[in-house]
Amino acid sequence: MSKLKLLLPVFLVLAACRPDQVKHLPGTKQIAEETANWEAIRITPTDLLHATRWAGDSLTAYADTLLRRTLARELKRGSLSQAASFCHPQSYPQVDSMARKWQARPRRAEWQTTNTAPAAAIAAAGLRPDTMRLIGRPAVDTFFYQRPITLNNNLCLRCHGRPGHDLTAAEAALLQQQHPGLKSVGRQPGQVLGAWQLTLERSGVAEFYTMKTRKKWKEHKMPKLF
């Protein structure tokens, strides 16, 4: 009987607590996910190759976007020669900053008129006008990324298109003079202009993989039960 008397107040207290009256510590889920992000994880060689493609796609897509915006601005000003001088997105400060963050060295290998390839790493399979990439690991701490640069934007035709149709004969002659040895003009939509190539350090690739796969906390409001 004495035990029942002692337990009765406890039962009454528990019965008085409704679910909507229970207070949870704020940010517990966020703290748990941040703790999980700090745990050491094993990154496999396959993971590093995936990260190489992710990093290459991200950096080159960003560079291409900046290039289109810059060319549109310069062409609007009316100077084709001036616009063509900006066709080096790999050297843009924003692209260079992004490349330094992921320890990558980007370059654009342009398609030449001679039989000599712009770079030894370019293979025929990597220059088809589609979404194919070449991903490799030439050394233990070095990764390589390559994807074709295709003429898939009308803005590019303004410099690389057909003389007398997309640009004047005088403009075509000026571009050929500025870029000797390169097939700068006379191209058609879908053709390959060259290739993006990136050399990345292992530490940068691993950091990109960690950032890409880390858990991101999202606040979820508790439903109102009562």
Image (tube, rainbow, N blue to C red):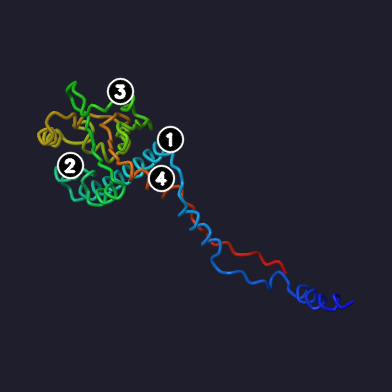
**In front here: 189 or 149?**
149
In space, the residues marked 4 and 1 are separated at their CA atoms by 11 Å
Q: Amino acid at mark 1?
A: Thr
Q: Secondary structure at mark 4?
A: helix
Q: Nearer the viewer, mark 1 or mark 3?
A: 1
Looking at the picture, how far across and down is residue 151, in whole percent? 29, 34
Q: Which residue is mark 3?
A: 124
Left or right of 34, for residue 11: right
Please rate how many residues cluster around mark 3, counting C-alpha atoms within 10 Å: few if below 14, some from 14 to 19, many from 20.
few
Q: Circle 2: is it few (<14), some (14-19), or many (20+) Cα within 10 Å?
A: some
Q: Nearer the viewer, mark 3 or mark 4?
A: 4
On residue 84, the disc is 2
**Quadrant (top left/top right/bottom left/bottom right) for the C terminus:** bottom right
Which residue is identified by label 4? 209
Point out the tag, 1 or 3, that comes first from the N-terminus. 1
Between 139 and 135, the one nearer to me in the picture: 139
Q: Residue at x 36, y 44 (%)?
A: 58
CB-based contact (under 8 Å), mark 1 and mark 3: no
Q: Quick one: label 4 or label 2, which is nearer the N terminus?
A: 2
Kind of residue at badge 4 = Tyr
- In space, the residues marked 4 and 2 are separated at their CA atoms by 35 Å
Q: Is residue 112 above or below residue 221?
A: above
